[in-house]
Each structure stands twice: as C-alpha cells, then as structure tokens.
Amino acid sequence: MKNFSKIIKAVAGMFASVTFLFMTACSNSNAAPRLSPEQEMVRLTSELRDYATERTPSFQFVGNGAAGLLEVTRHEPEESVRQLVDNLDGFLTESFFYTNEDDAVELQDPEMLEYLEAMMERPQTAGKAIWTLDYIEDDEQASIDKAMGRAKGYVSSTATTTALTDIPEVRVQDENADDVMTVRDARNFLILLNPEAFASREAYLARLAATPYDALVIDLYYGDDPLTADEVARLQEKPQGGRRLVLSYMSVGEAADYRPYWQDAWNDSDSRPKWIAKANPDWPGSYRVRYWTDEWKHILFGSENSYLDLIMAAGFDGAFLDVMDAWQMFQ
C-alpha cells in the first residue's frame, strides 16, 4: 500500500459537499480546538450519536466526506478512527469512480481511487454501509459506475447535477419489496436535497412516495416549514411494499444563511459571531464553522428547536451528516 498522506489535502476538492459528539473541547468556544480538527469532528459525531440514540435507539447516521478521517495519522490516532467507525452506520463519498473537471466527466485518478478504496476497507469490514455518489449525465457511464460499486460491495448511485434537485428517470437498481430497517440493508438510495423544482409540497411528497428506493435522503424542510411526522411516515412506505429509511440532511461543518437559525445581524460580516468562519465560494450563502464550539453545537442539538431535535420530532430514521471534511480548513 502506498503512503497517501501527501495527497490527503486533495480529497477536500473531491468531496464536493452535497447541495450534513461527547464533551465540548474548549472552555473558550471561539479558541482553537484543544484536540486536532480531525478529532474534534469525530468528537462531534460522538456527541450527536449519543444524544440521538439515548432518545431513539434505532436512530442512524450516514456521514459524507469522512474518508480522510479514516486515515491514522499523528493528528488522527487509531482510537479516533475506531470511534468514527463506531459512530456512523454508513459512509458516503462523492466523486468516487468519476470526477468532474471543466464540465467533463472522467474516470477517477487511479492513485486517488486506490486511496479511497483503502479508506473504505475499515468501515466495510466493520459491517458499515459504503455509499458512493458520482455526478454523471450519460446513462452508459452511470451503468458502469454502479457496476464498479457493486463489484466492491458498495451501493453506488449517480445524479446529473450537484444541485440534487431531481429524481432520475432510470430503473432503480435492485428494486425490492423487503423491509429496510438499517442503512446496511439498503440496496439503493436517492439523495434529493433541493425540492424547489416541484410545483407544490404535495407534488414533492407524492413524487418521492412513488419512488421505489430503499433509502431517501432529503431535507428537513419544504420551504420554511419542516416536514411533519405524518409526512415522513408516508415516505417510509415503498409503493411496491415494504418499509424504507428516510434520512434528513444536516450539515455539521457549515452554516447557511437560508436556515431558520440564521440571524439577520449575521449578514453583516462585522457583526458575525466568531464561530462562523470563511464563506464557501462554491456554495453561496454557506459558511464554514468552528464546529467544536458551544454555539454551533447548541444549534445542532440539545433543545426543542435545535436541528437534530427537529429531525427526530419529525420521525426521520436518521441523519445525513454533510461537510464532515470541514476539518481540513482548520489544519
């Protein structure tokens, strides 16, 4: 196995984030983390998992962009990697088999592909779900992508755009009528994070409900209002029979100015709290956050109106934790 430590920073560019836990590390929440940025991200997932499963033992988590956290380094020791694997039920990586450069879809660089596959070995051996999501418009390339994933024991999906606004007009791979109660049991999945293309809330829910996928990853909100428990329960039934999982998107590494927790005063950079870091130039309105701080954690969980609590109140089966690669900004 090659030494891939020199290419780890390249992973950040590959993990175009779609568009989602133990004690606070710092007495001064705006200070640099007491642990490494890598360990602080793992620590956050531990706190989230402990909080959720204490209330709903079956609640599950899929992490996006966590591959770099699976490499043992002096900043990310063996114990932290082991904890991350324990914390998550599934690991999703974008741009796994194919990449998009200058609007051209190309096969992944062999060295990077080898690195990504090596990072997935540990959670896969531990019985965790390995999902991949590549952005491909060509049907033939999409079929090849899914075949490569199947050969590795992954569940692979494709989307035509990173905006994740639509439902693919293709036959769902491994469609089945079995009950799916865990992420590991899902044979296929759909990620649809932006429902604005649908004419109404009912049209959005009806279209999702009619799909045969084993797992749906969607936003907590339609417009300004979160989905209700009745609406989520409707989506948990597959039209061909059997129950499916419905997971809610939740970013753990970025704040967004279109989310309900965002305050008007924060639109002024001079009035923005210190825990909000740099803007993400690739996603207007999104800002990297110092995710180890009390302020951000209070937004994520621990009160009736915090993000995770709203997800659980709506009856979702789990959360899709996005922007887990945010630690690279704070190295």
Image (tube, rainbow, N blue to C red):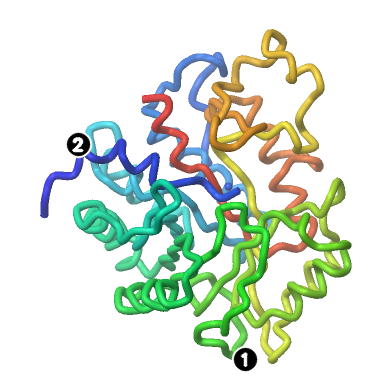
Judge from the rendering whether residue 58 lies leftward or rightward of residue 94; answer left or right: right
Question: Which picture quadrant has residue 204?
Answer: bottom right
x and y percentages locating residue 323 in the rendered image: 51, 42
Q: Which of the marked residues, 1 or 2, is nearer the chain's N terminus?
A: 2
Eyeballing the image, is 239 above or below 3? Answer: below
Residue drawn 71% across the image and 62% down it: 316
Eyeballing the image, is 11 above or below 136? Answer: above
| Neighbour tally class for label 2: few under 14, some 14-19, many 20 plus, Cα within 10 Å | few
x and y percentages locating residue 319 in the rendered image: 62, 56
Find residue 21 and name its label: none
Judge from the rendering whether residue 55 lies leftward or rightward of residue 10; answer left or right: right
Which type of secondary structure does the marked residue at label 2 adopt? helix
Residue drawn 47% across the image and 64% down it: 136
Who is closer to the viewer here, 85 or 213? 213
Q: Which image quadrant: the C terminus?
A: top left
Q: Amino acid at mark 2?
A: Lys
Who is closer to the viewer here, 46 or 174? 174
The residue that label 2 is drawn on is 6
Q: Distance of mark 1 from mark 2, alpha carbons?
A: 45 Å
Find residue 177 and name its label: 1
x and y percentages locating residue 172 in the rendered image: 56, 82
Q: Which image quadrant: the N terminus?
A: bottom left
Who is closer to the viewer here, 293 or 56? 293
Q: Amino acid at mark 1?
A: Ala
Eyeballing the image, is 28 above or below 261? Answer: above
Judge from the rendering whether residue 220 lies leftward or rightward of residue 3; answer left or right: right
Residue drawn 26% across the image and 57% down it: 113
Which type of secondary structure does the marked residue at label 1 adopt? loop
Res 297 seen here: no
